[in-house]
Structures are given as structure tokens and as C-alpha cells.
Image: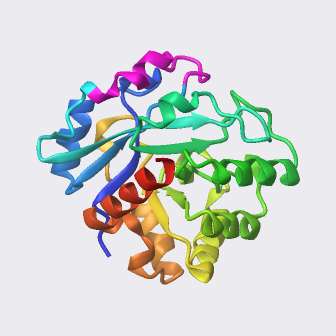
Amino acid sequence: MKIVVDTHTHTVSSGHAYSTVQENAKEAYTNGIHMINISDHGSAMKGAPFLYYFGNLEVIPDSLYGVRIIHGVELNIMDYNGTVDLPERYLKKLGLVLASFHDICIEPSTVENHTNGAVEILKNPYIDILAHPGNPQFQIDIEKVVKTAKEYNKLIELNNHSFVVRKGSERNCFEIARMCKKYGVRVATGSDAHISFNIGRFDNVMKILEEVEMPEELVVTTSVERMESYLSERKKRIE
């Protein structure tokens, strides 16, 4: 199994990342990645860009240095009812939308609250991927969340960076992958790169996929065609 799409990358616009779109694209090409999603943090994150940034992403070419560029965002989940930090009028213009919990934007609570928040996010037609759900700081009922993703035909992310910055994620990520396999839920893979050199780095994710013997057809990022198919699904869903 080879991953050729990185659905979670940051640029200098996130405020705490260090590479440009061009630098990310060049490094992606060098690392054998054919498609990347620009997923800078939503505006509630300190240092993140203002709303207009996301409205103007269309000026970025759809392809740079031989790499397909998706214009996306990593939304901040603002409460446990599924509120996020970008209005629908912006979300409907984007190509791929992630949403995640960050303790700088929302205070960790109970498993019940975290699960409810994740479920409401997955119900939102404009949101495609629940990002780094293995974070033990925001422990979820994994089976319930995965079954919701199945019901609403959404993606669950396996985040390579979580193993470094969100200690204790390994066990949750394994269980998430196992449940996705059990229920036939598709997964996306994100490096969560905050500098270009980490684009397409999936050593931790690959270990999990191998351990659970994940069917390749459930990993949408192993093929540009699979990813493009999902992007087409998204367009139909929000029309």
C-alpha cells in the first residue's frame, strides 16, 4: 500500500507553520505525493488567517509543480453542538473541509460531550473529515463516531503527527482504524505537516494500517482517483 495524497497540510498562513504553498508542493512532488490539501487553521485559532483568506484560496492554481492542490481548511470545533469557526458561505466554496478539537479553542470535557461534538460535525454536509480524532485529551466513543461517519458517508483521519504532539494517541488510532475496517468506513491520511519537509510522512499511519490489515480500498489517499471520486461526492452532497 502506498499513500499518494496528503489531506492535512499547513502553510505559513496558519501562524505557527513555516512553509509556503509553493514549498509544500515542491516537497510533496519530491516525496512522491500527487495531491495535497491546503488545510490552514480556521480563524478562531490564534495567529490563523482572517475569513477573507479562505474566500480567496481560488487564486491558488489547482496544480503546482506536478502536484494537485485542494483548497481546504482545518476548522476549529467551537462547542459540543458542532459549531465551527467558518460560515457556510465559505465552506461551500472549498474543496475539502477538516474539523478538529483544539484545546486553545474549546476546553476538554467529558467523553459524552466530545462524542456529541464529533457526531454533530460528521452530520454537517459541508464537513468531510474528522481530523486527529485519536487525541486522548478529547476522548470519544470511538465506535459511535465511526458508525456516524458510515451513516453520513464521511471520512475519518489517521493523523501521523498525533503520535508526536498528542501523546497517547497511538492506542486510540489503532482502535479507530480497527473500527473503520469493521464498519467499512473510509479513512484519510494527514501528515499534519507544519513545515514542508514533513509533507507525505506517514510512517506512524502506515504502521497502524498494516497492524489492522486495512483494505486498501478504504484508504482514499492511496489513489488520486479515489480521492477525486470523494471530492465529486462532496460536490454533489452540497449542491
Q: Residue at x 49, y 15 (%)?
A: 50
Farthest left residue?
65
The colour scheme is rainbow
Q: Which residue is drawn at 48% across and 80% down?
A: 214
- Say whether residue 128 is left or right of residue 3: right
Residue at coordinates 40% horizontally, 61% vertically from top-left? Answer: 230
| Rendered location of residue 171, percent (x, y) | 66, 66
Front position in the image: 2 or 126: 126
Which picture quadrant has residue 104? Answer: top right
Quadrant for residue 183, please give it: bottom right
The residue sitting at the front extreme is 239
How many marks are shown on the rendered structure? 0
Q: Pick the quarter of the image with the N terminus.
A: bottom left
Q: Which of 230 and 177 is in front in this view?
A: 230
Q: Is residue 145 above or below residue 41?
A: below
Q: Give the range drawn in magenta.
A: 43-58
Residue 27 colored in magenta in the image: no
For the question of whether residue 232 can be seen, the reply is: yes
Residue 50 is a magenta residue: yes
Residue at 57% across, 71% down: 177
Image location (x, y in percent) of residue 94: 41, 37
